[in-house]
Image (cartoon, rainbow, N blue to C red):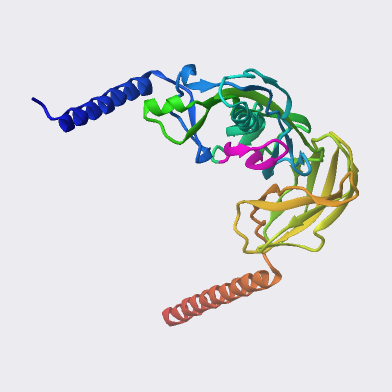
Amino acid sequence: MKEPGNQATQKIIKTFAIIAVLFAVISITAAPTLANGNNDDDEVNFIIPEHGYTVDYYRSYGEPIIQASIVGDPEFKRGEIAGLQVKIVNKGYIEGFKRLNADQGGDNSTEELLALAELEEEEECTTTKDLKATLVSETEYIEVDPVTSVQDVEEIETGHTQTLRFTIKIDGDTPAGNYELLLPVSYEYQVNVRTATPEVINLGLTNTEFTREYKTKNTVISLPISIESEPKFEVTEVSGNLKQGETQVVEVTYTNTREITAEDAMARIIVMSPLSTGKSIIRLGDIGPGESKTALFKISADQDAVVKKYGIDSEIKYIDEEGETSFSENLKVNVPLEASEKKISITGIAIVLIILIALYQIINMHRKRNQNNENSSGDDNE
């Protein structure tokens, strides 16, 4: 005959085994999120008990509304590497609530307290969770730094904002005008809360007050930016060359290849030894779109300057459309340097004459000596 104590122990062990098996099966087959009563913000990807273990008192109507805009001036310059700040704001609101279960039996006051507690949790339906934003450029002229292209935000409550920071690079040949960056955004939000009943203890779950269901939403936000108009210059022609030991005039033609006029433009060259110039700045005046102006520079080269093609730096200083002083990028002026013509100096001529005279004297003396020797020989023969 078995002792009563052993029977009770075996019954307890059998009960826990059944609960463990049931819990394992539900863990594999169930899906959404279970909320812990001790910490409502600590959601884990776990199971939700079947509706037989929960009660749905309220259904909320509302969700996050995500908007984004660029912080600061959205106008950029060609060739600029810019830090782009994007402010994300959640403007979601609750349209209303619907009471689903008015009487679940038991103490009505307790039931109402449970319903109000669920109603309070339903208010989180407008909060975003696990938001991911990716900045995308659809034009080859604007590049998004891949290191900063994806930004994550854990949570944004309604009425709150978060600032995302990206880096973009504007190509130097980008046409002026308006462009659009795209910001695909993905996030989750709460769509329903259910109140757990005491029966969840039979599943081995403790301290469980609510279960939550979430939905994922994707949206694409447009971020308009613009590239400012400004002149751009190119060296379109160079006439003239340099010579060793001489000063030559070099003509440099500059062309404005962009959309607006460069007012009161001045061309400047920067020369270094063995080259030099007495006047490095030439006034060109206004240069309209597509217009060309020519500057004449007098450039000197040292006598021992190496014969080769020299790249001379130059730039255009002008007044932009906002009345501010601006400078072009560096414009290279390539000029060949030729060897000087070989000339005989007066000193060289004098030296040559002296040598010739000396040679003449030597030859003349030698001729006279020979004549004297011949005359002496003739006298002896007589």
Query: What count of labels does the image hold?
Result: 0
The quarter of the image holding the N terminus is top left
Q: Which span of residues is magenta-colored?
A: 148-169
Q: Which image quarter holds the C terminus?
A: bottom left
Q: Magenta stretch containing residue 162, yes or no? A: yes
Residue 360: % across, % down: 59, 72
Give the overall secondary structure of the magenta segment: strand
Residue 245, position as x, y percentages in the image: 69, 62
Residue 68: x and y, percent? 72, 34
Looking at the image, residue 269 lies above or below residue 320: below
**Residue 248 seen in this snapshot:** no
Q: Nearer the viewer, residue 305 or 182?
A: 182
Give me the residue at 80% from left, 63% from top: 278
Asked if residue 93 can be seen in this view, the reply is yes
Position in image of residue 285 (x %, y %): 91, 47
Horizontal side, residue 50 vs residue 6: left or right? right
**Of the pair 38 and 29, the residue shown nearer to us:** 38
Q: Nearer the viewer, residue 8 or 343?
A: 8
Q: Residue at x 64, y 22 (%)?
A: 58
